[in-house]
Amino acid sequence: MTTKPDQKSARVEPHQRQDRFATLSFEREIAVPLSALWQVWLSPAARAVWASPSPSVTVEFLEADSRLGGREVSLCKVAGQPDIRCECGWL
């Protein structure tokens, strides 16, 4: 993963927050054709496999509309823990 030190940090002090949302940007170089990478990014079944942060976590996509203005809703699940709901919008 690479970082861009010239960009503003995603960390915001609590007293500076306007709402509960944040924009995160990640960068990584992967040695595959862009078209193949884009397909596994758009496929909920493929993302459920690689988006999991650890083997004990499963990811279930409830909505996956990758069109402009669309949204994704997913659940991160760990046995014995409450599910974590993630909602993302495509800008």
Image (cartoon, grey):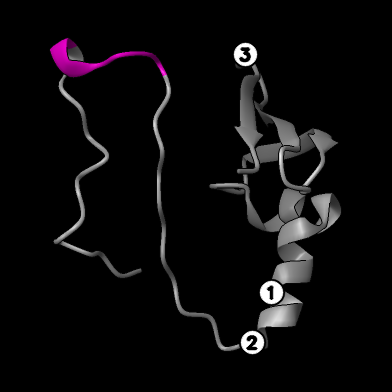
In the rendered image, the vertical position of residue 31 relative to residue 62, given as above or below: below
Q: Amino acid at mark 3?
A: Pro
Q: Nearer the viewer, residue 74 or 20?
A: 20
The residue singled out by tag 3 in the image is 82
State yes or no: discs 2 and 1 in contact (Cβ < 8 Å).
yes
Instruction: Verify whether residue 7 appears in magenta.
Output: no
Bounds of the magenta span?
15-20
Residue under the point 78% across and 48% down: 67
Look at the numbered discs 3 and 1 and tell me whether their residues touch, using CB distance below 8 Å. Answer: no
Give percent across and percent down for residue 81. 60, 16
Q: Residues within 10 Å of mark 2 (few under 14, many from 20)?
A: few
Decide which of 70, 34 is in the foreground and name it: 70
Name the secondary structure under disc 1.
helix
Q: Residue shown at 17%/17% (left/top)?
A: 16
- Estimate the x, y position of residue 70 in percent, counting from the top left: 75, 38
Residue 72 lies, in percent from the top left, at: 73, 35
- Residue 34 lies, in percent from the top left, at 66, 81
The residue tagged 1 is: 37
Quarter of the picture holding the N terminus: bottom left
SS at circle 2:
loop
* First of labels 3, 1 by sequence position: 1
Q: The C terminus lies in which quarter of the figure?
A: top right
Which three-letter amino acid code belongs to the residue tagged 1? Leu
Decide whether the magenta segment is chiefly helix, strand or loop. loop
Does the magenta-highlighted stretch encompass residue 18? yes
Residue 28 against residue 75 in the figure, above or below: below
Q: Which mark is residue 32?
A: 2
What residue is shown at x 67% (from left), y 88% (from top)?
33
* CA separation in Å, label 3 and label 1: 31 Å
Question: Would you call the spot at circle 1 few (<14 residues within 10 Å), some (14-19), or many (20 or more)?
Answer: few
